[in-house]
């Protein structure tokens, strides 16, 4: 991604255009997996990123699994897990707060030490929140040591919010569909029961007519 030196990342018109395209692409995604893949593909057009990944908590809540990435396939393939404990990404998920770290071999976080060894300068991890709970994070690593971390954090937060909003919309849509299916099923069951009741009512009325004393009197007259 090329940025004019006279423009900040937030002021660059190409970034605004790329964000607009990302919004449209996310809105068109039909599954959670497609949302993650779309974001991973678009982030390099928005940020001067060297590596990016989207990670989600595993069922036991102890690890984070890579679901989508850019620029690190050979190092950390999709499906690989990293521990929550002792990592900056894990801290972002556990606390629900973004983590911004300048890479250093002396960092207390395992992922930061590794990124430092691989030539990265800055690491930003923004938690992915769904209904107020962190389910994972969007991570970005940069080799450029002159970047403004506040602008990087602002843009990455916007991107993560777009993901959260879309996923919450999909969850609500699925819940609505399930509810509608439940209502439709109940309506069909009531219709069947009403039909059975109608038939039983007609049958009982006919039986009562045949066994009534008045009917017998008419027959013996």
Image (spheres, helix red, strand yellow):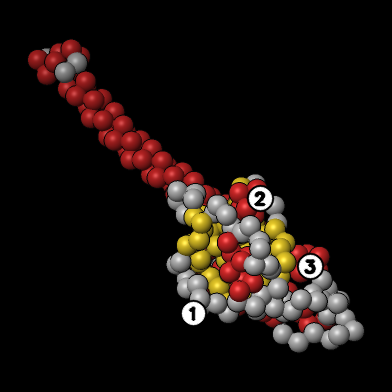
Q: Is residue 186 above or below residue 113?
A: above
Residue that mark 3 sits on: 149
Q: Quadrant of the C terminus?
A: top left
Name the mark on residue 96: 2
Farthest-out residue, left: 220
Residue drawn at 46 percent across, 44 percent down: 183
Residue 26 shows in this picture: no
Q: Nearer the viewer, mark 1 or mark 2?
A: 1
Q: Upstream in the sequence, badge 1 or badge 3? A: 1
Farthest-out residue, front: 106
**Disc 1 secondary structure class:** loop
Task: Work out how far the residue at label 2 is from the one at label 3, CA to CA, in angstroms.
Answer: 19 Å
Q: Position of residue 30 (x, y in %)?
A: 53, 67
**Disc 2 secondary structure class:** loop
Residue that mark 1 sits on: 74
Q: Position of residue 206 (x, y in %)?
A: 22, 27
Contact check, label 1 and label 2, Cβ < 8 Å = no
Q: Upstream in the sequence, badge 2 or badge 3? A: 2
Q: Quadrant of residue 12?
A: bottom right
Residues packed near mark 3 inside 10 Å, few (<14), some (14 to 19) or many (20 plus)? some
- Front-most of 164 and 191? 164
Contact check, label 1 and label 3, Cβ < 8 Å = no
Residues packed near mark 2 inside 10 Å, few (<14), some (14 to 19) or many (20 plus)? some
Q: Position of residue 58 (x, y in %)?
A: 47, 54
Residue 92 shows in this picture: yes
Q: Is residue 215 above or below residue 125?
A: above
């Amino acid at each position: 991604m090329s940025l004019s030196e006279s423009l900040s990342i937030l002021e660059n018109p190409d970034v605004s255009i790329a964000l607009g395209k990302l919004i449209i692409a996310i809105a068109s995604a039909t599954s959670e997996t497609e949302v993650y893949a779309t974001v991973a593909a678009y982030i390099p057009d928005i940020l001067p990123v060297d590596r990016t990944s989207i990670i989600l908590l595993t069922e036991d809540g102890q690890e984070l699994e890579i679901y989508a990435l850019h620029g690190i396939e050979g190092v950390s393939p999709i499906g690989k897990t990293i521990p929550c404990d002792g990592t900056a990404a894990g801290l972002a998920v556990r606390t629900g707060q973004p983590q911004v770290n300048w890479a250093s071999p002396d960092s207390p976080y395992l992922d930061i030490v590794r990124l430092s060894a691989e030539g990265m300068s800055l690491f930003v991890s923004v938690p992915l929140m769904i209904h107020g709970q962190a389910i994972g994070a969007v991570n970005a690593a940069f080799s450029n040591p002159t970047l403004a971390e506040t602008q990087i954090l602002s843009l990455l937060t916007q991107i993560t919010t777009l993901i959260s909003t879309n996923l919450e919309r999909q969850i609500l849509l699925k819940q609505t569909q399930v509810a509608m299916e439940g209502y439709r099923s109940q309506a069909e069951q009531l219709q069947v029961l009403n039909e059975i009741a109608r038939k039983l009512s007609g049958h009982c009325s006919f039986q009562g007519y045949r066994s009534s004393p008045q009917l017998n009197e008419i027959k013996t007259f």
